[in-house]
Image (spheres, grey):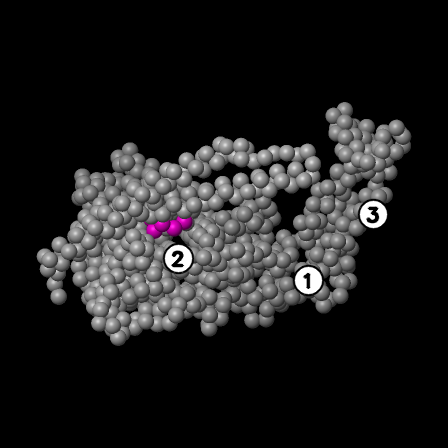
Amino acid sequence: MSITEQDWKAEQERVHSVTGKIQARIERLESEIGASKAEVVDIRKHFWDEVTVNLSTAEDITETYFSMKQQVEVLSERERSYRHAAETLRKLRRLAVSPYFGRIDFAEAGSRQAEQIYLGIASFADEDGETYLIYDWRAPISSLYYDYPPGPAAYATPHGEIAGELMLKRQYAVQSGELKLMFDTGVTIGDELLKQVLSRSSDSQMRTIVATIQKEQNRIIRNDRSRMLIVQGAAGSGKTSAALQRVAYLLYKHREHLKADQMVLFSPNPLFNSYVATVLPELGEENMQQTTFQEYLEHRLGKQFQVEDPFSQLESLLTGADDPQHAVRVSGIRYKSSASYLQAIRAYKERLEREGMRFKSIRFRGEDIVSAEQLRERFYAYDPSIRLTNRIVLMQEWLLEQIAEFEEAEWQKHWVEDEIELLSNEDYQRAYSKLRRSKRGKSFTFDDFDKERELLARMVVSEKLKPVRQRIKRLRYVDVTGLYRNLFEEPERIAKLLADAPLPEAWPLVCKQTLERLDRSELPYEDATPYLYLRELLLGFETNTAVRHVLVDEAQDYSPFQLEFLKRLFPQARMTALGDLNQSIYAHASVMHDMDPLTELYGADQTEVIRLTRSYRSTEPIVRFTRGMVPGGDAIEPFNRSGEKPVLTLTGSRDELHDAIVRDIEALYAEGYESVALICKTAGESEEAYEALKDRLPLGLITKSSPSFEKGTLVIPAYLAKGVEFDAVVIYNASGEQYRTEDVRKLFYTACTRAMHTLRLYSLGEPTPFITSVSEDTYETTAAVRG
Ligand SMILES: Nc1ncnc2c1ncn2[C@@H]1O[C@H](COP(=O)(O)OP(=O)(O)OP(=O)(O)O)[C@@H](O)[C@H]1O
C-alpha cells in the first residue's frame, strides 16, 4: 500500500499537533521551573531565618537540631524536584525537534481495533496522562517495530507475551518540527532511511541509531537473560552502536535500581571515549563509566613499575621485525596471554601453599627486624589447611607484634639519643605538644627530665618505624616481584608446574628477556595482567561489587587472562563482549579465536553468542574489496549503498607519493568530505608523513596521548583508528615492504575498514599482497600522474 497525499497530510498535521503540545508543556514547565528555582534560592538565602538556634540547654540543642534537619529536608526535596523538572525539560526540548521516528499499528489478538504506536527517544503522554502520543523506543511494545515486518507479531511484557497482528510499520524523518520524509516499510526497517542515515558524513562523534536499529542488533540491545553476551560482528556491523543503545535500554528497563555509574565500558583507547561520549546524552541518559584496560593496570601497578602500554608493545613488534629478539618476544607474548599460562600461575600458587614462598626482610636502619628466612619459616609453620592468603594476613598481626617488641627495646639505643639532640626547636615544640595531646588528662608535665627523655625517645622511634608499619599493613613483606621473577629464573619451572604446558621453543630466551626487563623495573604489557593476577591470588582480590554491567568493546584484543581478571574484579556484573576476530591486531591469541575462553568464563549455559554479518559503515564496493582480505570474508554482507571502487595508486618515489596524496586529499575536500584519515602503519610512519605534508595540507597528527578526534585530515597510526570511522580513508603506504608479513594482515584490514564512503590506497613500489590477492575487479589501479 503506498502512501497517499491524504496520509501525508494527516501525518504532517499530527507532527504539528504533537510538537505543539510538547511546546506548550515546555512553556509550562519553564515557568514552573523558574518558580521552583527561585524557591530554592530563597530557601538557601533565608535558611537561618527559619531555624531557631538555641544551644542553652540540652533540650534547646535537640530542638535546634530538629529544626535544622527539617529545613534541610525541605531544601533537598525542592532541589530534587527542581533537578527532575530540569531533566524533563531537556528531554522535551529534544522531542520538540524530532518527536518520533516510527509508527506501528498493532492489533492484539482478539481485538479488531489496531492501536497506533508512535516511537521516539522518550515517551510523552497527553494531558490526561494516559494517552501516549509517543512511546519510548525502549518500551516493551516498541520491540515490535524492530523485530517484525507487517503480519503476525508478538512482544514480551513482564506479565507474559502479547501476540497479535502488525498492520503497519512506518518511518519518519522529522526535522525542526516538520515532516521531511515518510516510508512504509516491509521486511527490514526501511533501507531507504538507513541509506540516508549512512550516507551522511562523519563528524568525529558517534551517533545514536535508535531510528534504524536492525533486528539482529535489537537482540543484542534487549538481551537480558545471559550472564555473558558475546557478539562477534564484522567490521562496521554496529557492535559499538548496539552496545551503547544496550546501555540506554538497560538503564530504562531497570531504572528503579540501575544507575549509569554501575555500568562500565572498556574501550580500546582513551580517544575512543571522546568519540562515543555524546551517544547516551543524546538519548537523554547519563554516560556510563568509561575506561581502558591499560588505565586500570596503571592504577594498580603504575607506582611500582614502568608498565608498558599495548601500543608500545605493538610498536615494538611492528618496527622490529628484523631484530632477532622480535621472534622471541612474539612467542613470549603468545604464551603469556594463553589459558595455559593462566593455569600455570594457578598451579604455582598451589605449590606456594606448600613451598617456595618468598618474603622480604623487615629491615630497620640497615638491619633485619625479622629476616626473610624467619618470615618463610613462620609462614610454613601455620596449619597448612589455612588458606595461603589468610596465612599472609595472620603474619601481618604477628609482624606488628614483633615491631612493638622491637620498639620497646629500641628507644634506649644510642642512635635515639643522637636523634633527640638533632631535633630542631620547632620539632621539639611539635613533639612536646603532641605528647601533651596524647597524655591529656594524665597531668602531664615535662618536669621530670628522665621521663621527658623517655617519652621523646619513644616518640622518635615510633615516628621512624611508621614506614615499616605501613609496609606491613600493605603486605609488602610478600616478595611478589621475586615470586613472579622466579617463574623465569629457571626455564623448566613452568614445565614442572604444568606437565603439558605448550611452551614455545624459544622459552629460555623469553625467560632471559623477561628477567632483563623486570630488573629494570619495567613490566612488559604481556606480563602486567599475569603479574597482577598472581599478586591478587596471594594477597586477595580487589573487587568492585557496585558495577552490574561490564561492556568490553574490541574484545578480540583481550587475552583470556585479561577477561578472567575482569570477571574477578566485577563479581556482581554481567558481561557483554563485542569483537571481531578479523580485527585482532595484537600478537597474543585472541579470545575471539575459538570462543572457548569467552564461553568458559561463565559456562556455556550462561553464555549467548550473537553474530552480526552485515556491514553498515562502508559502501558496497568498499566492503566487497576489504572482505577479500580476510578468511571467511565471504560471509560479510555489504549493505546496499553505492560508491566508487577503492583506488590503488602506484608511485615510484616518496615525492611522487606525497604529491599524489596532496592532490587527492585536496580533491576530497573539494567534494565536501569533512573527515579524512591518512592512516599509517606505525606512530613513526605517521610522524614522518605528518612532517612531510604538514606545510602542504591542514593536518592533525594523532598520537596515543591525543585527547580527542577533530574534524579535518588526521594522520593516524592504524591501531589508534580502531573502532572509529572517517568519510574517506587514505592508506599512506600500502606497499609490500610495509605490509609484508601475515601478522599485519588484520591491522591492514582494520585500517581499510575505517572508510565510510571512499577508500584510496597508495603504494611506494610494489603493493602489499593483501591487496593483490583480492579479486581484481573489486578495485581500480592507477599510476601516479606527475603533478
Ligand atoms: N542500525 C543502524 N542504523 C544506522 N546506522 C548504523 C546501524 N548500525 C550501524 N550503523 C552505523 O554503522 C557504522 C559502524 O557502526 P559501529 O562503529 O557500531 O560498528 P562496529 O561493529 O563497532 O565496527 P568496528 O568493529 O569496525 O569498529 C556507524 O556509523 C553506525 O552509526
Q: Quadrant of the C terminus?
A: top left
**Residue 600 sits inside the magenta stretch:** no
Task: Say what amino acid the circle numbered 3 marks.
Answer: Glu
Question: Is 284 in the magenta?
Answer: yes
Q: Quadrant of residue 496?
A: bottom right
Residue at left offset 21%, top offset 58% = 171
Residue under pointer 2 = 252
Q: Which residue is mark 3?
A: 405
- At label 2, which amino acid type do we have? Tyr
Q: Is 200 left or right of 569, judged from the image as shown?
A: left
Mark 3 packing: few (<14 Cα in 10 Å), some, or many (20+)?
few
At x 78%, y 47%, the residue is 403
Observer able to see residue 496: yes
- Tell me the distance, in whole angstroms, between the alpha carbons under discs 2 and 1: 44 Å
Viewer-side residue, 192 vs 204: 192
Q: Earlier in the sequence, mark 1 or mark 3?
A: 1
Residues rendered magenta in the picture: 282-286
* Nearer-N-terminus badge (2/1): 2
